[in-house]
Amino acid sequence: MILNVAVIGSGFGGLGTAIRLKDAGIGNFVLFERASDLGGTWRDNTYPGCRCDVASDLYSFSFEPNPRWSNTFSYQPEIWAYLQDVAAKNDLRKLIKFNHDVTDVSFDSPSKLWILTTSQGVFQARNVVLAAGGLAEARMPDIEGIDSFAGPIMHTARWDESVGLAGKRVGVIGTGASAIQTVPQIAPVVASLEVFQRTPSWILPHLGHQVSERSKRLFSAMPLAQKLVRSLGYWRRELMVLGFVKDPSKMTKGETLAREHLARQVHDSQLRERMTPHYRLGCKRVLISNDYYPAFSRENVALVTEPIERIERWGIRTTDGALHEFDLLIAATGFYVTDNPACEMVHGAKGEKLVEAFRGDMANYKGTMFPDFPNLFMLGGPNTALGHSSIIFMHESQLNYIVKAVKVALERDARIEPTIDAARKWTEELQQKLPGSVWGTGCSSWYLNAHGKNTTIWPDFTFKFRQETRHFDPKDHEISV
Ligand code: NAP
């Protein structure tokens, strides 16, 4: 059977796609999921303390509000449960092919079909929505000797519950969003904890709090009230674009707040200095936490800023010659983003790989379509991630366009791809906004590809992206029947 649409992934992106396809009356589609359950990154990241740093009313589908979030910024179990509920309510499970690891997606020009090779057979589809997630492939650190370590090494996104922490000497590599959430949680359990920091992060106070039963009742009885809260949060975040994109010098206000937060929580001036970033706030992802800095006032927690030289059988050797001995290493070292393996496996009409789009060598159209990749749509494609707001908003914008394009493709049995001119125009105009933004102020981050080009972040207000993706514009596409 030839599928109308093959959706790859069953996280926020895949489930959102399924709901929107159903709403549009498009049937005969399947979600391919490599794991045995749905949920994507919110299924995989089970490390202690895992939590979303975007408020839950915004970090959820606009068409599936949840009036019962227990915290304004939810923890992973609740977000995963939300996705399970959304899937149940919309009867999506039966559309998901679990344990189907997609290993190759290639366009066959003569038949105008995409051929998907999976761990459980080959499938054909007229359209493909790649919703494999930008933060799905855990990146282990590229440190000499990593394979020689005698104990376990766990990546935060591949947490193994069976590895006990109690009484262990633990080393954490990295001080990004994942590390700062897990360090305070595991510190009281382990015998000792050393945190290896390569670059300090800017950390702002966390404003999350429990949601009262009264608010939950109000949101259940009057969905408009929750919509209003969501809207206020949305516009407050949009204001940040003024600093992030238009005038990065405005970020100094935030830097002052972050420095004050650090000063309040870390009283040792030397430690404070080592934890103070020396790049513009926002250049790397801005973090929020109230319990990360205080973890370092515990006797059993230490910060290591001496660079790592190599990993040895018994621990980590730093460049000052010291050997830091451990029973367990935790790699909080992020993900393959600009070199996402999900894009390595996709081959277009001329055989080229989709990953070139992130290497900066290929133009893209609205972060969603690519010339020579007909009828293939990518959620979270180039320059659609955000430093200031919710990726779900961006997904929903992309889906407005995707559903319309898929409808045209199916109704006319057409091969659709953006014209090279439209794709170049989009890509070039977008790239012109980046050098003057906060991400161009000079720091290394996972927003940049190997050539230092930002192929990750959307450099504008998100409502502009919403406008851009509202319609399917035939004149920007080659439509061949
Ligand atoms: P990350 O932000 O990429 O941080 C990786 C950390 O590991 C950095 O501190 C990095 O140092 C360090 N590192 C990497 N390789 C290293 C090496 N070879 N030697 C020493 N240090 C090394 O990864 P993450 O913390 O997993 O977060 C990734 C993204 O996931 C976040 O930015 C966010 O978008 C998402 N996330 C979100 C939440 C949330 O609350 N919503 C929670 C977790 C993750 P450098 O800075 O020097 O490169």
Image (cartoon, rainbow, N blue to C red):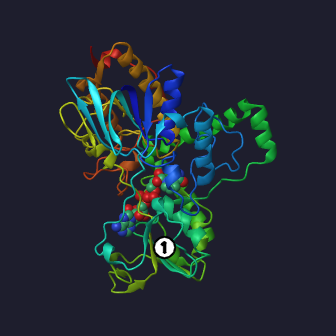
- Is the residue 83 above or below the residue 107 in the image? below
Q: Is mark 1 within 8 Å of ligand 1?
A: no
Q: Residue at x 66, y 53 (%)?
A: 208
Q: Residue at x 39, y 21 (%)?
A: 405
- Tell which quarter ligand 1 is in: bottom left
Task: Name the foreground residue: 158 vs 425.
Answer: 158
- Percent of width and height locating residue 232: 65, 37
- Percent of width and height locating residue 437: 39, 45
Q: Quadrant of the N terminus?
A: top left
Task: Name the foreground residue: 448 vs 374.
Answer: 374
Mark 1 residue element: helix
Q: Residue at x 35, y 80 (%)?
A: 318
- Is the residue 450 above or below the residue 193 in the image? above
Left or right, 131 with respect to 217, comes to left
User: Pointer 1: what residue?
Assistant: 273
Q: Amino acid at mark 1?
A: Glu
Q: Quadrant of the C terminus?
A: top left
Q: Is residue 252 visible?
A: no
10 Å neighbourhood of mark 1: few (<14), some, or many (≥20)?
few
Left or right, 364 with respect to 275, comes to left
Left or right, 376 with respect to 240, comes to left
Task: Name the foreground residue: 135 vs 120.
Answer: 120
Q: Is residue 26 visible?
A: yes
- Percent of width and height locating residue 117: 30, 40
